[in-house]
Image (cartoon, rainbow, N blue to C red):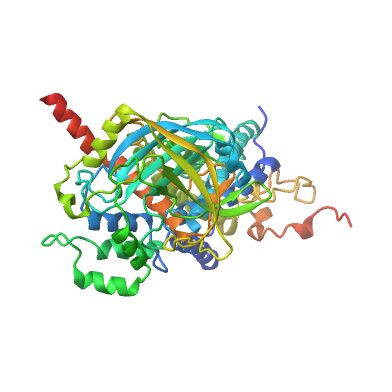
Amino acid sequence: MTPPPLDFHPALRAVHWLMAIMVLAMLFIGVGMVSTTGPLYPALLALHRPIGIAILVLVLIRLPLRLATGAPALPDALSPMEKGIAKGSHVLLYLAMIGLPLIGWAMLSAGGYPVQVTKGLILPPIMPHDLALYAVLREAHTIIALSFFALILAHLAAALMHGLIRRDGVLRSMTTGHRRAAPVIDAEMPVPVENADAGEAIASIAPQEPSDPR
Amino acid sequence: MSSDNRVPLGPVALIGAIVLLLIAGFAWAAGWIGGRRISGGDITTALDYNGGSHPGYRRAHAKGLCFAGTFEANGEGAKLSSALAFKTGSYPVIGRFSIGGGNPLATDGRTVFHSMALILTTPDGQQWRMAMDHTPIFPVADAASFVALQRATRPDPRTGKPDPAVMKPFLMAHPEVKAFQDYIAKAVLPSSFANATYYSINAFRFSTGGNASLVRWQFDPETPLTGLDKAHLDQLPRDYLFQEMIARTAKQPSRWHLRLVVANPGDVTDRATVEWTGPHRTIGAGTLTVTSVSPEENGACRDLNFDPTILPQGVTISDDPLLAARSKAYSSSFTRRAREGAGPSAIGQDLAKEHGQ
């Protein structure tokens, strides 16, 4: 068996940050558009659906990539309960990323609406036209979205705590990654440990880059 | 492990600040903090305040009848819009006749909107949803005024009429309502759903790709207009207009001609309170034929939201703020009644009585 990687795969890191921006934007757009009868309502609605479907497409690429490339091991310093919470919260994050767009799509289907993503793109319904079902899905869309936002805040706080306080390499595994050319590090240290990650949250890795292409 | 147990205050404060900032931004986006906004719920609540609480029904135009038919496009509309619905051909339509107000069992003998809502579907899967009234203008121009209108015109339980002490200051603050009041006072109240002209109320932007124009439209009836006797409206049976339409449709279909009216340079296109007067370029785009009607219990119209901003390619909303407000308010009303579960319609009740006896 191959040992777990030190970092998340670079492609996975790129998708993570792209989706982080999209998902956060989406949650703000969502609560914003339902709050108003002003001209922002149709404008935000026109953004909400294409971004939602884009998130669904991206997460369906991201999940197999994550399963194929694996995740770095959590630091031994974490208790089994902390590790359990970390794993569980990531499962929930993936479920929300897949579930929310699907529920949005299903909800429009059950409401008898055309699932109009853009002016030209209309998706087929994925649920029968059923008002009671629409009511349940509409409620679920809100509840899951608000829980998703809370979960993202917890995820962010935990990531920053790893990066700023524990400095255990967890945050770095999703940002710049650990430097592979490790001979500068003491040979007695087979994997980078706490000290190697000092200051990682500032992500001021640039001066340490091995080569300067100029 | 043997780590330093002291928690560094700086990073903890930084993390806390970032999280709090995001929560504050989110709360602002959601309208929980900051300036007052009018939500869709505020409008449905105002409608409930005006018309009484009728769970399970549309908050406006609660009393209705489903219909089905076709729209035959003659190709002329393609001059203004690339919507497939304007290409020569026949397209299926489902829709709903209704009268204004939130009471699903109201009597038809009132001076209120006759309305026609419809969904026109083209083979490319695009839908054009329309919600039209028999008046060319709307009493108010925006969401805030609409909420104020509902509060001001609530019938006083003692007199059945709006309280003058509330109505007077409202009309002072909203002189635009007078145009509608004057119109409705002098206009003929159509004696049938079939002989009313139905107007788009708002202007919409039509485009062919290259050219864009602002357009209001109307469905002109083939059936000659006759009016109800406004002095004796209270003598009409409760469901007079609906029963008349059911009996009429059993004998023959009813037709309307779609007329597109292009805005002149000086026309007000962002306020539905102002009528367009004088000569205009108009285009006859085709014929709507209503071939069947059915009570909401059996028809296809009840569980649909006739949101007038659901438009095909080639048509978009104009700058009229009423359109966004209508869209959001319809959506809130739709979500509320979906949660509550539908009740029987007036026409469904009539049918059940007939069968029961």
Q: Position of residue A104 (x, y in %)?
A: 46, 40
Determine the residue positioned at 24% across, 69% down: B167
Camera sees residue A64: yes
Side of A17 relative to A102 (left or right): right
Q: Position of residue A68 (x, y in %)?
A: 64, 31
Q: Give the quadrant of the C terminus of chain B.
A: top left
Q: Is residue A51 above or below residue B49?
A: above
Question: Residue A37 vs residue B227: left or right?
Answer: right
Position above or below: B25 against A82: below
Against B186, residue B99 (above or below) is above
Q: How many marks?
A: 0
Q: Is residue B24 left or right of residue A21?
A: left
Q: Considering depth in this image, is A175 or B322 the residue closer to the camera?
A: B322
Instruction: Judge whether A114 appears above or below B180 on screen.
Output: above
**In the image, residue B146 lies at what x, y percent?**
35, 61
Residue at 31% across, 65% down: B148
Quadrant of the rendered image containing residue B151: bottom left
